[in-house]
Image (cartoon, helix red, strand yellow):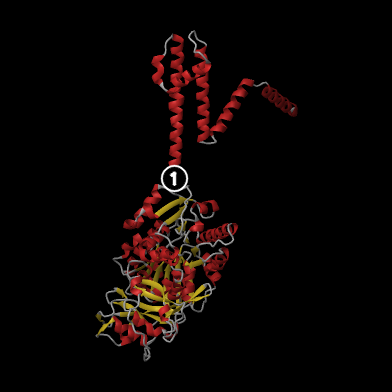
């Protein structure tokens, strides 16, 4: 019975649908077709309105032609209706009741159709066009621009570094025949707010003529073509601590982008060469994958490894953060420069340092196939080759110019023994927090051959997860003994239980599991304040190192004896400098790595010059006799002076230190 009722209902609805009003169906069909036309864009909007205007003009003309005062022909009547439709000024010229009524109706329709709808459509089209321009959807046509793919917490600092490095940029562009610096940024969100954010970050360096935003993501080829990536002088592809989720997701996006660019290049001209690309990979294990993904010239900053090297060195030698900040930031003191040395081909390395009185000669970068081999603080009898590049620490590139009338002569130095750098046999370190850099920091501790580390980690991240990450990296348990504790670093009771006064160093890591760098720094600041409060109860004060995300928050630590590393800023500066001079990447890898050439603090007493009036030029010569390179002086008040004037005298005390570059076999 139920099945029969269902069949009857279906039959009823079918009969009802067949007997639907045919005029309603025609009306709905016409409405549907008009809707489809309107959705095709502004051109079809105009076509629909023009058709309606034409119908009104034809209808009005035919009506007036049927009155008692017709026109000579239909064309004239239609023209009469069109004039009334577009211009109400003709309304007073009409005579006769019928003609005036028709004229009035046509004129009113003209207000609605011609003046109202047409102007509304044109206004909408103009607004949409302006919005498209503001959104950065128009492809650019440029050559030798510097292209930054993606807006992350590194982008504004990269642009700032490029703007500051005016002379370095000028030399870079001269090699390419470019007129001037122009930075193009491909960002997912291009808006007035984004522009104002960059303007605030650059301050007086802001120049809208040198910066162009374009909307898009680097994973899509049509968006890459929008920024003319093939004609860029260099492409910078920064990582992101927060924009794409985890560090692993950021690395995957970067590798996918490298593959997309390479694939697009293969589809073009076979002789086409892809631009130099400088990118950042968090996980060093993925560096090999990234190199295989890009078929052009690629420079990779393994940022987690690089930054944790700086952190580990700073833990071992408190105060090095000031040296790192000076070297890595353009315009804030001395930095690393590289220039050719053809005029010194065949001479010994130790004989040419005197030709540069305003710079410190650090070593040599020697081409090795398509790569470069850094040799910092090499033996003084190293013979310079024609393709060698000399590496300097100087305030400006012009200070790396050799003396014009310098007479090269063989320098014979009597080598003197120097005591080893004093290091603790066993160092206790407390790490507060956990992020993607933590495992690499522990691994970097394990590379220190003369020290052992006892590390305790306090974090809300489950201990099992942290232990799995440590095990995956293969950290040597003989050199680094790690103990994991679960707890809230912002809790005073939890910190008191850790007894931070019993450690040599405390490292506060920024949180990468929050959504923004502002939230991360807020937690870091609170942890630091709680730590300081707990340490007031302790007689021993450990050295504190803070991992910050935003340089604007550095001022909050100025009243404390705390060292700060703004890790995104460090990565940004290196990316920008490598884009302008790719050899500098291997120099930084050598300079900040464990082993090879490292920056150390030497006590003045090691050189036997405490209480004496000596110039920095004399200190340089003393260091050379000990197989070291003097970089500067750290004064008792904590001030760091790199590459001071060579003839400026200093009265150094036992509490002052010399900043030197030492090879591992000498340290």
Q: Position of residue 428 (x, y in %)?
A: 42, 76
The quarter in which the N terminus is drawn is: top right
Q: Position of residue 315 (x, y in %)?
A: 40, 74
Q: Nearer the viewer, residue 61 or 581?
A: 61
The answer to whether any part of residue 347 appears in the image is yes
- Picture coordinates of residue 600, whole percent (x, y): 38, 79
Write down the residue under mark 1. 133
Q: Quadrant of the C terminus?
A: bottom left
**Closer to us: 613 or 57:** 57
Q: Quadrant of residue 427?
A: bottom left
What x and y, as percent, mark residue 5? Answer: 72, 26
The secondary structure type at the circle numbered 1 is helix
Q: Residue at x 41, y 22 (%)?
A: 87
Dot 1, how many residues are within 10 Å of its Cα: few (below 14), some (14-19), or many (20+)? some
Instruction: Name the residue at the top extreme.
Output: 68
- Who's the residue at 40% across and 18% down the image? 90
The quadrant in which residue 422 appears is bottom left
User: Can you see residue 543?
Assistant: no
Examine the rendered structure and indicate whether residue 449 appears above or below residue 262: below
Q: Is residue 212 above or below residue 473?
A: above
341 versus 459 height, above or below: below
Foreground of the two, 408 or 115:
408
How many marks do you count on the picture?
1
Residue under the image location 34 percent in, 76 percent down: 359
Residue at the spot x=44%, y=31% of the render?
120
């Amino acid at each position: 019975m139920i099945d029969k009722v269902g069949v009857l209902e279906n039959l009823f609805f079918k009969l009802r649908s067949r007997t639907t009003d045919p005029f309603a169906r025609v009306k709905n069909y016409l409405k549907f077709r008009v809707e489809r036309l309107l959705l095709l864009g502004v051109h079809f909007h105009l076509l629909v309105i023009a058709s309606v205007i034409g119908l009104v003009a034809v209808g009005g003309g035919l009506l007036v032609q049927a009155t008692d005062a017709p026109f000579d022909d239909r064309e004239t009547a239609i023209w009469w209706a069109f004039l009334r439709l577009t211009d109400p000024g003709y309304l007073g010229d009409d005579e006769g009741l019928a003609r005036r009524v028709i004229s009035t109706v046509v004129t009113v329709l003209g207000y609605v159709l011609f003046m109202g709808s047409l102007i509304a459509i044109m206004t909408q089209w103009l607004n949409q066009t302006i919005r498209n321009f503001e959104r950065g959807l128009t492809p650019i046509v440029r050559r030798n621009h510097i292209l930054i793919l993606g807006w992350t917490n590194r982008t504004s600092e990269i642009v700032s570094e490029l703007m500051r490095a005016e002379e370095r940029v000028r030399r870079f562009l001269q090699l390419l025949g470019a007129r001037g610096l122009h930075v193009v940024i491909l960002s997912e969100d291009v808006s007035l707010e984004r522009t104002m954010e960059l303007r605030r970050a650059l301050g007086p360096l802001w120049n809208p003529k040198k910066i162009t935003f374009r909307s898009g993501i680097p994973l899509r080829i049509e968006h890459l073509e929008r920024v003319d990536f093939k004609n860029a002088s260099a492409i910078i592809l920064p990582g992101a601590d927060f924009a794409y989720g985890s560090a692993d997701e950021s690395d995957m996006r970067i590798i996918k982008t490298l593959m997309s660019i390479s694939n697009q290049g293969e589809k073009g001209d076979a002789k086409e060469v892809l631009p130099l690309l400088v990118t950042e990979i968090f996980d060093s294990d993925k560096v090999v994958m990234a190199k295989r993904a890009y078929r052009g010239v690629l420079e990779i900053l393994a940022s987690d490894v690089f930054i944790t090297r700086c952190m580990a060195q700073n833990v071992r030698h408190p105060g090095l953060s000031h040296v790192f900040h000076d070297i890595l930031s353009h315009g804030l003191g001395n930095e690393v420069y590289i220039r050719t040395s053809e005029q010194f081909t065949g001479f010994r390395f130790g004989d040419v340092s005197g030709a540069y009185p305003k710079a410190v000669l650090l070593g040599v970068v020697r081409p090795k196939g398509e790569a470069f081999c850094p040799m910092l603080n090499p033996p003084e009898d190293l013979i310079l080759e024609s393709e060698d590049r000399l590496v300097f620490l100087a305030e400006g590139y012009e200070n790396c110019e050799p003396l014009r009338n310098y007479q090269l002569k063989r320098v014979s130095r009597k080598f003197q023994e120097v005591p080893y750098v004093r290091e603790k046999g066993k160092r206790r370190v407390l790490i507060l927090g956990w992020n993607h850099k933590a495992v690499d920091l522990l691994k970097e501790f394990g590379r220190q051959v003369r020290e052992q580390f006892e590390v305790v980690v306090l974090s809300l991240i489950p201990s099992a997860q942290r232990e799995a990450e440590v095990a995956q990296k293969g950290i040597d348990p003989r050199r680094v003994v790690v103990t994991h504790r679960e707890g809230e670093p912002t809790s005073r009771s939890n910190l008191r239980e850790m007894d931070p006064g019993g450690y040599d160093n405390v490292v506060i890591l920024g949180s990468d599991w929050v959504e923004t760098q502002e939230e991360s720094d807020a937690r870091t600041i609170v942890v630091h304040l709680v730590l300081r409060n707990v340490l007031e109860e302790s007689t021993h004060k450990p050295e504190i190192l803070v991992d910050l995300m935003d340089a604007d928050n550095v001022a909050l630590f100025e009243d404390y004896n705390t060292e700060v590393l703004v890790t995104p800023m460090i990565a940004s500066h290196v990316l920008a400098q490598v884009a302008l001079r790719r050899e500098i990447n291997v120099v930084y890898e050598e300079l900040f790595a464990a082993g090879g050439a490292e920056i150390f603090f030497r006590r003045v007493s090691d050189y036997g010059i405490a209480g004496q009036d000596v110039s920095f030029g004399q200190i340089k010569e003393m260091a050379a006799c000990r197989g070291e390179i003097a970089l500067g002086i750290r004064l008792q008040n904590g001030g760091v002076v790199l590459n001071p004037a060579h003839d400026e005298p200093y009265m150094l005390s036992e509490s002052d230190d010399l900043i030197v570059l030492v090879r591992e076999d000498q340290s």
